[in-house]
Amino acid sequence: MTSPDRRRFLRLLMAGMSLAPALPAFAQAPRRQVTIGGRRVRVIDIHAHCVIPVEHLLTGTKLAGSGGGAGGTILGPDRLQTMDRQGVDMQALSINFYWWYAADRDLAQRIVSAQNEGLAAWVNKYPDRFVALASVALQFPDLAAEQLEDGVKRLGLRGASIGGHANGEDLSLPKYDPFWAKAAELGVPVFMHPNGSSNIVRADALAGRADLVNIIGNPLETTYFLSRLIFDGVFDRFPNLRVIGAHAGGYLPSYLGRSDYACNRANVTCASTRPARAYLQSQILIDTMVFSEEGLRHLVLAIHVQAHRPDVAIAMPRDTVLMTSVSASTAQIELHFSGFCDVFDSGPISSTATPRYRAMFSRNWPEPDAHWLVIL
Ligand SMILES: [Zn+2]
C-alpha cells in the first residue's frame, strides 16, 4: 500500500468509525445479523466443508473407511445453529479430501452420485441457507464434465469442488480440458481445495511439529495449482472459466510481482498471454482465509480492481461487499469495513453471471467464530 493509499485507508477507517451504530450491550437475537455501515449484508461462506456419508458404497473396496464423516461435518440441525451464532447467512457446501479420485469409474460414478444427490437434498430442505458445489470424479475428465453438468442442470448445484491434482497429475494437462471446458460452458465457478501438497513435496518433508502439511502444504499446493493453470494457458484456453482458490489463493497474491515477471525472463516459455496479476484480477477468485486484518488488506489490494480501476482504488466499486467477524464485535467489523464496503449486492454465488464479483469469503477455520466474507 502506498503512503497516500494508506492514509486514505486510515481516513476511511475513521469515517467507518463514525458510521457504526451503537450496539446493545447484550444481543438477544438468536441469529446474528451482520451489517456494514449500518446496512445489513448477507454473509456467504464458500469454504464450508461437509460430508455426505457414502460408506455403504465402499464395503469390500480399497476405499473402505474413507466415506464416513464425524462431528460437525455431517449435516444436521446443529449446522444451522452454528451458522446463526456466527452470523453466516449462507454456506456454499463442498466435500473435500477428494479420496474418491482413487476409485475406478463405476465406483466413482456411484460415490459422486450419492454425494451430489445428498447435497441437493440438503439444499432443497434449506434453500435460503445453503447452496452446494458438486463433487466430480476428476480422474475421469469426461465423466467429471458429465457430473458437473448433471449437478448444475438437474440438481441445482452452483459449481464444482475439486482437489489440487488428480492422483498426482497436474490439472493443467490437456486431458483435463473437457472438465474445464464444461465449467466454462456452464458458467459456474470451480472451488479448489488443497490437501497438503503431497503432489509437490517429498514424503514427510512437512511432517513433525505444527502440522506443516496444513500450514505450509495447503497454501503451497494452491499456489502451485493456480500457477499451473495460469502459465500452462488453461485460463487463456477457457476465458469464461472462473476458479476459486482456497486459503486466499495460497501464496500467489503475496508474491505476485515475481509471478508477473515470470514470463519476461530469457528462455522461459509460457502459454499464458497476460501477466499473472491479470488472471488473479479476473478469472481467479479467492476466499479470505488469511487470519489477520493486515493480511486481508493486502489481499484486497493485490486482487482488487486497483490495477484496472485506479479511480476506485480503495473506495471499492458499487458491487463490492464484504464481511467478516474474526471474533470481533459487529461494531469492530463495521469499523474495519464500512470505509470501503458500503453497497451490498445480493446476487448469486456464481461469479460468471456478474463478472464484477471478484472474491469471496470464508470461514476462518479452525476458529469456530471467525469468518471473512468478501465479494469484490
Ligand atoms: Zn478447508
Image (cartoon, rainbow, N blue to C red):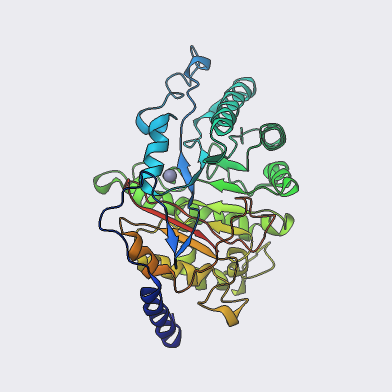
Q: Quadrant of the C terminus?
A: bottom right
Most extreme residue toward the bottom is 4
User: Percent from the top left, x then y, of residue 375?
Assistant: 54, 60
Residue sitting nearer the eye, 350 or 109:
350
Total labels: the figure holds 0
The answer to whether 185 is drawn above or below residue 167 in the figure is below
**Image position, residue 144 (x, y; %):** 66, 35
Q: Is residue 52 left or right of residue 308?
A: left
Looking at the image, is 166 positioned above or below residue 242?
above
Q: Is residue 368 above or below residue 63?
A: below
Tell me what residue is drawn at x 41 percent, y 27 percent. Answer: 69
x, y percent for residue 346: 59, 55
For residue 339, what is the image quadrant? bottom left
Pick whichever, 369 or 198, lies toward us: 369
Residue sticking out furthest to the top: 60
Asked if residue 370 shows in the view, the reply is yes
Quadrant of the frame with the N terminus? bottom left
Residue at the image position 37 percent from the left and 76 percent from the top: 18
Q: Which residue does the image show at 73% across and 43% down from the upper left?
A: 182
Ligand 1 lies in quarter:
top left
Q: Is residue 22 left or right of residue 339?
A: left
Q: Answer yes or no: is residue 250 visible.
A: no
Residue 203 % position (x, y): 38, 41
